[in-house]
Amino acid sequence: MPSRRQRRVRVASVLAVLAVSGTVGAETPPVSGQTPPQGPQTSAPGTEPPFRPLVTPELTRAVIDAALRTAGHPLVRRNLASLAARVRAAAALPEVWLRGSHSTSDALNLAPTLDDPYHYSSSGGIGWLFEARLIWHLDRLIFEHDEISVERLRADREGDAAKLTSKVVETLFAWQRASLRANDPKSSTEELESAELARTEAEIVLDVLTDGWFSERLRRPSASR
């Protein structure tokens, strides 16, 4: 049976082993003025660049203006405004009537003489008549019937402009979606081909609507696809 002294030595040995193990496993405090050792750095997963839409409010307004200019809408709007002003001004002007006529006459007049108590003489002439009238229609100052036709033409033209604007916006966003699909690396080959075809179709439609303005805009260095 071990003696008391042997047991004390054995316990001291065990405590020494445990102390050494704790020292090895513990972290060494950094020395003042030194950077603590860094563990293995794990690279952050690649972040995708922020989404930048191709269709912006400025681009949309520019394309719509170009399409309306190509369709001649500003010129027609000015012509209709001028026509409405002339119709309103004409209501204050009088209506002018001018008439001219002439007449001829032949007559036999009894002019007896001593030698010929049944003598007749003929007479004739040409008469001219000129007439001018000024007529004011005061009711036209309140309402002119021609204004209805002008407003109907204006409403039809504004409706055409609204349809053209809607088509431009719809085609622009179709071009935006097709461009995103065409640049998506996750898309398959068939999807990329379909997206490229849709993008080309949208660009052609916009180019026709703007009479070549849209393709020139895309060729600028600042324009991104």
Image (spheres, rainbow, N blue to C red):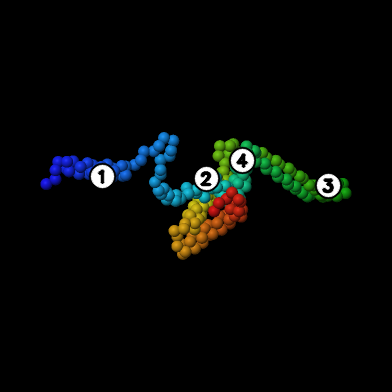
| Real-space Cα separation, disc 3 to disc 1, in angstroms | 179 Å
Could you say which is closer to the camera, residue 22 or residue 171? 22
Name the residue rendered at 44%, 49% in the picture: 47
Name the residue rendered at 62%, 44% in the picture: 78
Mark found first going from the N terminus, 1 or 2: 1
Could you say which is closer to the camera, residue 211 or residue 130? 211
Identify the residue under disc 1: 17
In terms of secondary structure, where does tag 1 sit?
helix
Mark found first going from the N terminus, 4 or 1: 1
Mark found first going from the N terminus, 2 or 4: 2
Residue 151 % position (x, y) = 55, 45
Residue projecting furthest to the left: 1
Identify the residue under disc 2: 57
**Is disc 4 surrounded by few (<14), some (14 to 19) or many (20+) residues within 10 Å?**
few
**Is disc 1 surrounded by few (<14), some (14 to 19) or many (20+) residues within 10 Å?**
few
Identify the residue under disc 3: 112
The image quadrant that residue 36 belongs to is top left
Residue 122 % position (x, y) = 81, 49
| Real-space Cα separation, disc 3 to disc 4, in angstroms | 71 Å
Hey, what amino acid is under mark 1?
Answer: Val
Could you say which is closer to the camera, residue 41 or residue 135? 41
Hey, what amino acid is under mark 2?
Answer: Pro
Would residue 127 appear left or right of 28 to someone viewing this image? Answer: right
